[in-house]
Amino acid sequence: MDIESSRSGAHGEPDAAAWVTVEEWGGSSGSALSRTAVLTASASSLASNRFGSRWGRIGSRVLGAFVPEGFPGSVTPDYVPFQMWDTLQGLSTYIRAMLSTQALLGAIGVGEKSATVIGATFQWFLRDLTGMLGGILFAFYQGSNLDSNAKMWRLVADFMNDLGMLMDLLSPLFPSSLIIIMCLGSLSRSFTGVASGATRAALTQHFALANNAADISAKEGSQETLATMSGMGLGMLLAHVTRGHDLVVWVSFLSLTIFHMYANYKAVQSLSLSTLNYERTSILLQYFMEHGEANYFLLDKDGSVCIFIHKQAVATDVLKSFVHGLVLARFMQKSKSCHTEAHQWMDEKYNTFISKLKVEGYSTERLLSHSIVWKAHWVYGPLDEKTK
């Protein structure tokens, strides 16, 4: 809030020309502030001017219920695409849940005079018990791996959820195996609950640029609730329309499942996780070895040093390879472990050497030499029988 004032009159007393201006600025700690209102007051008048439309202000407040404070500056750039695809896959899940639940309730006898309350209750009890035990066992065996492989387990969780709903939809077709199918479906969904919740916690930490993991988690819950209500409403409508038309039910379910799998893949693909696990470390190392600073290698043969330049090498790499070759040639005359000592010298003293050359006025951007016509490309991998 900014306050500006004007005072005039003898002996420091205000007169009719005195006025005060108060500016209201809106925003948050993570985003730029913008002026939202100006209030001007004097001895004889009071005027206010509010900036922006009423609908714009209402929209901002509604948006604030679903995105974290300071959005978009308080979250990573991949937050928006991930949440968009995640909401779409959640919507398809809740629509299909209505179809599968309707089939499951019909299978246990809801609406039939011959069905007993105690029988349906016992079947539901076995279903829930299997899911609970499955969740405990899954957390025991795989709980420590969920953080390091959040992307993979995110996909696995949703695949198991799809499998569980498929089991529910199949249950009316196999009445003699109803309890087994119900328990298998509940077991699949129990894996989903554990894996999805754990990986969501890891992703929330990734999104939280402003140490606002709790805010992100709360707003994600609001987004999930909105998707749940929308999906349940659409699912109820679809279940009512397709009632008694088994073929339409299956076509709708399979179509939504395919979309669900695609949306999950796009959601995971949009993530740019900054933590290192086994797979990401291997990929980054492979890229570094092919495109990174290892843009040359040396080979000594019969007292000569051969330098191989990578096709991605730049002028500074050529200079570095030449210096490395000279160092290796010197150590070849003194030591059997010449390559190790040459690498150690380059690691410890090359930058100092280049810095001193710059201080003396030498240009160290490139090596004046004949043009290098032939360059190499090498690939790192295990030896096979043909290359041994």
Image (spheres, grey):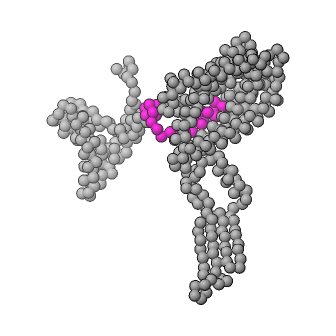
The residue sitting at 69% across, 57% down in the picture is: 57
Q: Residue 186 in the image: state x and y as whole percent.
A: 65, 22
The image position of residue 219, as x and y in percent, is: 62, 44
Predominant SS of the magenta segment: helix
Above or below, 56 against 189 in this view is: below
Q: Quick check: is 346 in the magenta stretch?
A: no
Q: Quadrant of the N terminus?
A: bottom right
**In screen coordinates, is 236 left or right of 270?**
right
Q: Is residue 43 above or below residue 367?
A: below
Residue found at the very far top of the displayed protein: 176
**Considering depth in this image, is 138 or 316 the residue closer to the camera?**
138
The answer to whether any part of residue 153 appears in the image is yes
Q: Nearer the viewer, residue 13 or 148?
A: 13
Total numbered labels: 0
**Residue at position x 46%, y 31% in the image:** 279
Instruction: Classify residue 304 by image quadrant.
Output: top left
Task: Using the image as rendered, state which of residue 177 and residue 267 is in the foreground.
Answer: 177
Q: Residue at x 68, y 28 (%)?
A: 257
Which residue sits at x=25%, y=39%?
344
What segment is highlighted magenta in the picture? Answer: 259-282
Quadrant in which the C terminus is drawn: top left
Furthest residue in direction bottom, as rendered: 10
Q: Is 246 positioned to the left or the right of 19 in the image?
A: right
Q: Nearer the viewer, residue 378 or 13?
A: 13
Q: Position of residue 288 (x, y in %)?
A: 40, 37
Residue 160 visible at all: no
Q: Is 300 displayed left or right of 293 in the figure?
A: left
221 on left or right of 138: right
> Quarter-wise, where is residue 167 in the image?
top right
User: Which residue is the extreme one toward the right?
Assistant: 113
